[in-house]
Image: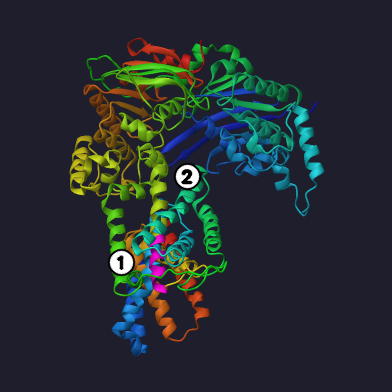
Amino acid sequence: MTVTSETTKKKQLSGIVDFLSKWGTIITIFVLLAFFAITMPSFRTASNMVTIMRSISIVTVIATGITVSLTVDGFDLSVGSVATFTVALVMSFFVWYGWGTIPAIIVALLISLIVAVVNAFLIVKLHIFDLLATLATMFIFEGVAMTYTGGGSISQGMPRLDGTPTTGTIPPEFRLIGQSPYIILIMLVIVMLVHVFLTYTKHGRYLYIVGGNREAARLSGIPVNRYRTLAYFLSTLLAGMGGIMLAARIGSSQINSGAGYLMPAVAAAFIGFSVAGVKKPNAIGTLVGAILVGLLENGLIMMSVPYYSLNIIKGLVLAIALAITYYKKHD
Amino acid sequence: MEPKHKLEMKGISIEFPGVKALSQVDFTVQSGEIHALVGANGAGKSTLMKILGGAYDHYEGEIYFDGEKVNIRHPYEAKELGIDVVFQEVDTALIPYLTVAENIMLDKMATKMKGKHLIRWGNIHRTAREVMKQVGIQLDTHMLVQDLSLAEKQMVLIARALATNTNFLVLDEPTAPLSQTETEELFRLMRDLAKNQNVGVVFISHRLPEIFEICETITILRDGRVVFDGVIEQLTQQKLVELMLGRRFEETYPKAHVPIGDVIYQVKNLSEEYDRVRNVSFRVRAGEIVGITGLVGAGKTELCKTLFGAYPIKSGEVLLHGKPLKISSPHGAVKQGVALVPEERRKEGILVDEPVFVNLTLPSLDKFTKGPDFVNTKAEREVARKVINELGIVTPSENQKVAYLSGGNQQKVAVGKWLIADAEVYIFDEPTKGVDVGAKRDIFELIGELARRGKGVIYASSEIPEILDISDRIYVMYDYTIVKEFETSEATEEKILFYSAGGQ
């Protein structure tokens, strides 16, 4: 008798754990919303909700990049540097060379794909672990971006480091990209596109299969290396897109402007694993993860938690997200 | 001269979930002799030696050392008696990024350094050199183990055993990966150990000529029991094979008769980049089932993987319908009509975390796309349900994770995915491994059906009775190449085993 009651207890317990790992993120979001709304009247204004969505847009887009790299059981740490690099490129095209919006964006994104080429070469050809290879490229392209700008920032009207005056301007339509509602709409469109690509196309299916069992995928005739390369190209492209949005938002190129987005993006992607029980890296989950991280940050700032202590809480959230992902993987 | 030791195992029995691996086995070995332990696959050789090495603690029976009862339940208890086992997978016992000297002295460093914390490098290299000199191994002690050849790694393991006073040394199929000269070098060492170092050597091998060359005494196991124990001179190769096989009570499967057409698939002088396939030539005709057999380690799996582009080709040609194939990757092989059902099902054949339908449509996903590469899941599921019915895959639905299916049903999924892909040539590598009798029959029927459709089938297995049941023609492999071709009607188990074991 006692044995059976114990097993039912165990079953109940694992049921609860299951439920929490599926819906815990969403429940937490609502609990946080309720808590902040009750304690701070200014939190529940519509304009603050827009602020939160606007503030997570860039993180979310960069995080979808990490998500795609995770589908093939990879990990792209270089996304922050890609964003920094793209910001520097696009700003230099405007300010130094006076280009228009469309060519500047397209050329900046194309050049940033050099990072993907290097990542794919290191990982697929030289067989370096994903995490270590992208750690290297993270530093390399942080340095490349800084060298390109001459170790300084680029903004409208500011002369280049060698003293050459600049005449280029940042087109106002480019700045629109960084303002709501456009920045939020762009984010939602990108999340939907990545979601459709990963869930409903042949290529998305193959990415997950390659990540699930590389050898079985190879012996099923899937060109495994081609798909791993594709994943890194997409993650760089999405991180570059995040960089474009960042450039439009701040209107200048600052040193290491993208670096701060890496950590929350990683957190968002890993929180996204377990949302609604998908148990795979996925775009919608990543969006939910980014909302959780953004909400927490916004609420805590409004509660006057000093900015220099925020990293403690953000780090803890990441640790919890990783714990949920890997703890469940074990059984 | 050191005193002679005698090691006796009496009435050893051991069970694993669902299998009685050994029952009432007696085994005796003495210092100074080289004792052969032989038997077919699964006869219990390795299990018996693992017990001797202290790998299991749940066996029944007793072990005596010089007439005194001893307790061996842990590896260190075996080591204390001077019993060392060198298993087949040498790499698992070596640390690749340490030097030869450190690897040789590993046991000593691990067990004899209580209370000491500093390593005296001079001592380590000197002692290692002495041990190697004792047995005539010539290697630089400063070399890293990862840079050694397989044969040299074995030497290092043997030297390690000798560094701690060895009385008995067990070598589990040491010659399988070795070349002719390397084997001779090993034999020289074994003889030296037995004659001059007073070590008792237990030698496990599938290669009959080797056993007759080097061993004096022999124990033959069959299905977990001893069927012969004595001096090797009482036996001939033929007699040994008969004892190993005994009478088998295998079920037979009636082979469907299919008219055999022209040659569709032809392999000419194929060699693999790293010599894992050597100068292999054979042909397959339409509707024909070609068996490829040989002992474990003869190169069957390597051949299958090379034909499928998973291993790189060094030289030779593969023709399908008279046209040369360009095979540089599995992706290319599949595109050109070649399918492989690999041996390591869970690692290579199926995706356990994915549902049945995803597994089944994986190689042929292109057939289920519409518009710009969108997957038509409805069509996918429909075809999956059809295949589940045809093959009798036991699953609640096509959405079930493959991890929850039984081994036999997993194998049917691994086969089923290639039916949808519709290849010209099907390669099966040990398709019945770990599969129950019922599922085995289904898989045989399926292979028969492929032949009826005029496909070419290559069936690689070390289960000779199965090969005899299902094939039209048989190629026997030994040492990574084909050594004999039989019409199945003219082949017998004895003949095949004779050539598999290197007989000429």
- Chain of the residue where label 2 is placed in the rendered structure: A
Task: Name the spot of residue A15 as percent of width and height, x first.
Answer: 33, 65
Q: Nearer the viewer, mark 2 or mark 1?
A: 1
Identify the amino acid type marked 1: Ile
Comparing B327 with B8, the one in front is B327
Image quadrant containing the N terminus of chain A: bottom left
Magenta portion: prevailing SS class: helix
Comparing A248 with A40, the one in front is A248
Kindly identify which numbered label has been placed on residue A234: none
In the displayed structure image, the side of residue A21 where residue B445 appears, left or right? left
Name the quadrant containing residue A223. top left
The alpha-carbon separation of the residues under discs 2 and 1 comes to 32 Å
In primary-sequence order, the first of circles 2 and 1 is 2
Kindly identify which numbered label has been placed on residue A186: 1
Residue A5 makes an appearance in the image: no
In the displayed structure image, the side of residue B34 where residue A121 appears, left or right? left
The residue labelled by disc 2 is A124
What segment carries the magenta color? A240-250
Task: Name the spot of residue B163 as percent of width and height, x first.
Answer: 74, 36
Q: Is residue B206 magenta?
A: no
Name the quadrant containing residue B343. top left
Q: Does the magenta stretch include residue A248?
A: yes
Image quadrant containing the C terminus of chain A: bottom left
**Image position of B254 with respect to B404: above or below:** above
